[in-house]
Image (cartoon, helix red, strand yellow):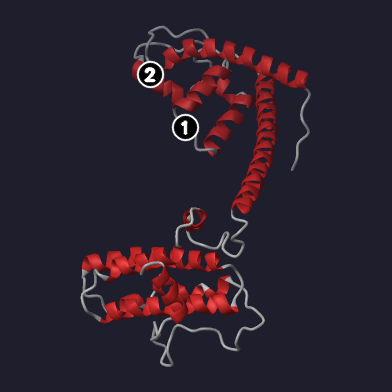
Amino acid sequence: MVFPTPPFWLVTQITRVIIIKITYLNRIYNQWFLCLNGRVKVIPPRCWNGIQDGLKNHWSQGHEGSTPSRGTDFVKKPGVQIIVKIAKTLGIYGKLIKIILIICTNMNFTEIIIIILLAVIAYILWCIYRQKEEEKEQITNKKFDAEWEAKKKEEFKDYPHLYGKLEGNWLEVFALHAKNKLPLLKLANSLWLEESVQFDPSEGDEKWYRLWDLTEELLEHLEKYHGGSVIEHEIAVCTYWQIASEAIGEVIKESRKVGGNKLEVEPYTNIEKIVSLFPKKANHPAKEITFTDEKGSFPRESKGSDIIKKKLKDLGL
């Protein structure tokens, strides 16, 4: 629901009336509140004014021997009854009810209704103001998000198959390496090799080596049968090995002898997802590359790739 913006003069006049009334009532409250908290021994005129139930008991406990002043049966006034019912409905008791009743001792029914109406109007105006501010904020946020998205797309325009698909900020990290002409294939191999030396001979150690052989096979497969640049392929592989090496490092802290089943879960199995990042070329074979054997065991044995091994050799590895 969209509210029309109220005229400025109306807002000004309502605010002025509320401020004047609140100032007046605050002065009365400061005087009457002393009466209810036992700080005076003489009841100010009209303080009692018929508040004969709860407040009378409160007064008698703190002012033994005092006599309430005469006044109208204030608590039976229609306006006060409305306020009391609202307070009880909302679960507001104690001091708040006392404050409301004290303020109302100097108000007639018409004044109470006016104050309620002014409060409602003020609340509506505040809602309108907040709605306008939220709309402005939403527009600003959408504009900022659009500008940020456009900036990032321009920054990673050379990596359309990876933008928004890799975990964390690894695309940004490895794209910077590529920009600085750092060999990404060598980096991926270093990430794998760094953790390889931490293993004790075990089934997990054997599967860790299989994962690298499969990585070589995967890179050759992507270069031959899938779209995307070689740099994109290598960034995807670097991201995989960055996350996998961090995960296996935590496992090795528990035991250097790693069970094979430890490498049959994510993030190690996420190597299977890399293929889906890049579209197939027309020469793609009928079957996609797989990472499990006929029995469903992961990772399957692989001979790696002579092409990738030659690249690594040329890089000094």
The residue lying toward the viewer, choosing from 85 and 65, is: 85
Instruction: Name the mark on residue 60.
Output: 2
Judging depth in this view, the residue of 308 and 155 nearest the camera is 308
Closer to viewer: mark 1 or mark 2: 1
Location of the C terminus (image quadrant): bottom left
**224 displayed left or right of 57:** right
Q: What amino acid is at disc 1?
A: Tyr
Instruction: Name the residue: 23% across, 65% down.
Output: 253
Q: CA distance from mark 1 to mark 2?
A: 19 Å
Mark 1 sits on what residue? 93
Q: Position of residue 260 (x, y in %)?
A: 30, 80
Q: Is residue 269 above or below residue 232?
A: below
Residue 50 in sight: no
* Residue found at the far bottom of this picture: 294
Q: Residues within 10 Å of mark 1 (few under 14, many from 20)?
A: few
Q: Residue at x 40, y 18 (%)?
A: 59
Q: Which mark is residue 162?
A: none
**Tag 1, which secondary structure?**
loop
Is residue 148 visible from the viewing direction of this image?
yes
